[in-house]
Image (tube, grey):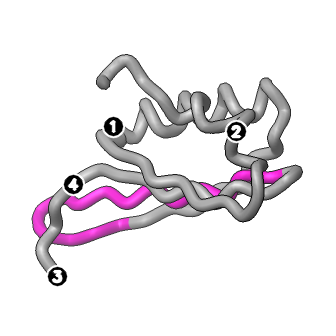
Amino acid sequence: MDVIHARCAGLDVHKQTVVACVRVTMAGRAHHEVRTFATTAADLRALREWLVAAGCSHAVLESTGVYWKGHAGAARTDAE
C-alpha cells in the first residue's frame, strides 16, 4: 500500500472516550501509537496537543450517532 500521508491519525469517538491512533512513517517504515482520552475539555486539549506534537497533517473521525459533534474541533490545528 502506498503511503499518502506520512503523519496522520484516526479518531474513534465514543460518548465518554476518544481512542486515537497516530501513524508516522519514517524511512519507509510505519509506526503507530494508540492512546485513549476522556471527552472532557482538558483531555480534548491533550489530544490536540498530542496530534500537533506528532506532526499529524490529517485526521479522520469515526463515530456512531452524534457524539462527534462536540469533539470534532479538538483535532483541528493551525496547520490547516
Identify the amino acid type marked 3: Met
Measured in 3D between alpha carbons, the distance from the residue under mark 2 to the one under mark 1, in whole angstroms, is 24 Å
Residue at 78% in and 25% down: 42
Rendered image quadrant of residue 47? top right
> Quadrant of the image for the N terminus?
bottom left
Measured in 3D between alpha carbons, the distance from the residue under mark 1 to the one under mark 4, in whole angstroms, is 9 Å
Q: Earlier in the sequence, mark 2 or mark 3?
A: 3
> Quadrant of the image for the C terminus?
top left
Which label number is shown at residue 46? none
Q: Nearer the viewer, mark 3 or mark 1?
A: 3
Identify the amino acid type marked 1: Gly
Q: Nearer the viewer, mark 2 or mark 4?
A: 2
Measured in 3D between alpha carbons, the distance from the residue under mark 2 to the one under mark 4, in whole angstroms, is 27 Å
> Which residue was labeled with disc 3?
1
Residue 7 versus residue 42 in the image, above or below: below
Out of 55 and 18, give the one closest to the viewer: 18
> Which residue was labeled with disc 4?
6
- The spot of residue 3 in percent (x, y) is 16, 67
In the rendered picture of this protein, how many numbered marks are placed on residues?
4
> Which residue was labeled with disc 1?
55
**What span is colored magenta in the figure?**
17-31
Secondary structure mainly formed by the magenta segment:
strand
Residue 79 versus residue 51 in the image, above or below: above
> Which residue was labeled with disc 2?
69
Q: Is residue 73 magenta?
A: no
Give yes or no for contact between labels 1 and 4 (Cβ–Cβ under 8 Å).
no
Measured in 3D between alpha carbons, the distance from the residue under mark 2 to the one under mark 3, in whole angstroms, is 32 Å
Out of 48 and 54, give the one closest to the viewer: 48
